Amino acid sequence: MSGVALLALAPLAQAIPPSFSSQVNIPIPAPNQSVAINLRTAGALSGSPLIDITDLGQGVVWVTNGGVTTGTDLSIDVYDPNDAGGVCVVIASGSLGYTPTPGDTLFVPIQATNQQGESGSTVPPGITIINAPGPGIVIPGNETQEDSCADLNQAPVASINGGNQTVSDTDGAPGETVRLTASATDPEGELLTFAWFVGNDQTPVSTLQEPAIALPDGVSVVRVEITDANDETGSAEVTITVGNATGPAANAGSDRSVADTDREDGEDVTLDASLSTDTDGQIVTYRWSRITDGETETLLGTSGAPTLQTRLPNGENLIQLLVTDNSGLQASDTVTITVAAGPVITTLADIPNLSPNQRRVALALDRICNQLRDLSGLTADQQDLLIRCNGLQVNNTTANQIDALDEMVADDFAVARTQTLLFANTQYASVMDRLMALRGGAKGLSLAGLNIIVDGKSVPLAQLQDMVKGLLGGGASADEPGGLLSDKWGMWARGNYSFGDKDRSNSSPAFDADQWALVGGLDYRFNDKWVGGVSLAYGQSSIEFNPRDEGGLDTDTWAISLYGSTYAAKNFYFDAIVNVANADYGADRNITYVDGAGLVNVDAHGDTDGMTYSAGLSGGYDFLVGGLTLSPTVGLFYIDATIDGFTERGAGGLNLIYDEQTFQSFTGNLGFRVTYAWNLSWGVLLPHLRVDYVREFKDDADVFGVRFAADPNATSTPPILVETDNPDESYWRLATGLSAQFIHGISGYVEYQRLESFEFINFQDVSMGLRFQRSF
């Protein structure tokens, strides 16, 4: 392109000469006072700065009244606080002052000149002063007002006619010559100089007001700088596009997915348009917006940088980029950014059909897990519990979650109550058997054979003695008086073995149990109606939870008892016992379940001890009808037990803290025993039948508290309450058996026993015993 493109021309701005208005409002100063006035601000003087007041007509303010002109005691002078000249004057009043009269007109001739030498003046009668408040008063010492008196030079105002332009190709050759025209407004009307620049080049391509500038194809930025005589400069620029300009190419980047990093809705994302280009210019703005519903646009941000940090919601986000180059040309692009939703965290307590114990654990875990996710600086066990929380609550099935909650429930330790009550009842039954033997006349050393008992239901060994005492020669009449083991002192020992099982319930697991105990005692006959004694017992018991490898509970117990019996009347008796026991417990709890991360299999172990206090009272009567003995009985037994609190170990974040536990049992029993003595040549056979009805008066469910040891607020929050099974309110104990009494103080028996009306316990028992007794 070699042609010339012509743009519109504009004339050079001219200075405006000074001129005055016909009047100005100025308050007349009092005698010996003065007032400073900026004539331009007061509206008395106009024209392009810089203007200087050059002639004040001898500095006299005149008054005209009725065609007569006279001088006044008022004077006028230049007010020039900065020694820079200017447009301010000061009017002063002499000592006589001046008081206007009706018809007075004040005036003063003034002449002003600008820097071009052009002048203006107030021709007679001069500028008229109206004695009235008005603008333009200058307060001496006010720097802003005093600086305005200098009527300082102002920079020229520049513009390029036609603004931004697109110039078409006129000759088919590269480039085009473009004629431009600058316009300028200079308040002072000074001589101006021009300098033209293309792009960032600091070398001027022309110093004319109307240059012809050769520009290349594409976009060019042309700038003009206009300078006045005082070196004040104004500038303007335009964008000239020669030929068909190529617009920018927008590139918002490739579609991508953003993973969740904070488990919250949305994610912080960096939008990047750095691959956007402009071959013949530069991109000046990047505008980002989010498009929803195919048409709704939400502005995310606009900047001159290609990147923008913003937060996008979960899901697919259609992002639009709009770029604008220095020619005003635009291009757009879109990108789809998919923000992964944070993991769906299950609120465990909202799972339906949870048992009460499971729901309490769920409520605690919901609180603890949320707290752990918000905390930093976690302990090793707290970090482990957080891993368990995420595995349990994220990407897990409801069935697995219920199984996991069931595994975490601490109802396993509820069987400590079973073991404690079992040992207390065994201790009670052992002493009651001894008292029954004593009522039958037993003295000296008594060694009882092995008793087999299921779930704490003991088999009495010495109940035959009162049946055979008069038939064979093994009674008290054969004992020799005197000595420690005489007819007043007696020593005895007894061994028990019991076993049983329990079905699973909503509040406790299934298990198999076994227990053995050794009991020995020393007693003394005070007279033929009273006997008392003391016994010492040691027992071990073991419970294995079902299915196998689910853990267990082992208990070692020592106990001491005080007991006694008395006959209130013939064949009518009372028995009493008081027991104190100390137990050591070793609990193993296996926790196995599947969560969102896989198999969890850990073992928790804890050790503790406890005290048990118990007491029993019973009474009965023996009716003898030939060889038949009918024995109704009634009794009460009370147990009060405490198990100390402890903390598990070995299971990491799933270890529990157990609060102290207390529980009681209070039972009453009503029984009836029938025994028949059958005399044979080689001895005596005694078949018997026994029925007992047992009633539990403390039938409320026991509750104990646990906490997760890794809970950040374990010491300040309420415990997780674990509810145990309600005790069976009542049940029946049925037994039948056969005893045999031989010569030389040897006796034996076999008995079958079962319990009826238990909800979860299955009990059947076959017991055999051998008893040897003789006097010393």
Image (cartoon, helix red, strand yellow):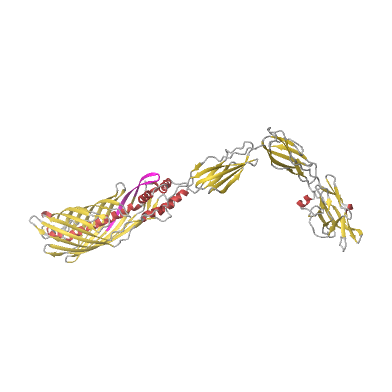
Residue range highlighted in magenta: 579-606
Q: Indicate yes or no whether the magenta region holds residue 504.
A: no
Q: Residue at x 91, y 62 (%)?
A: 66
Could you tell me residue 395's position as x and y percent?
41, 47
Q: Nearer the viewer, residue 3 or 631?
A: 3
Q: Is residue 341 above or below residue 472?
A: above
Quadrant hosting residue 567: bottom left
As drawn, the residue found furthest toward the bottom would be 569
Q: Nearer the viewer, residue 741 or 128?
A: 128
Residue 152 visible, this orientation: yes
Q: Nearer the viewer, residue 455 or 271?
A: 271
As drawn, the residue found furthest toward the right would be 68
Please name the predominant secondary structure of the magenta segment in the image: strand
Q: Nearer the viewer, residue 367 or 575?
A: 367
Could you tell me residue 693's position as x and y percent?
23, 62
Could you tell me residue 503's position as x and y percent?
28, 53
Image quadrant where one finds the N terminus:
top right
Taking 611 as reference, is 137 left or right? right
Quadrant hosting residue 352: bottom left
Could you tell me residue 582's position as x and y percent?
30, 54
Residue 494 visible, this orientation: no
Q: Indicate yes or no whether the magenta region holds residue 589.
A: yes
Taking 212 as reference, is 660 left or right? left
As drawn, the residue found furthest toward the left would be 681
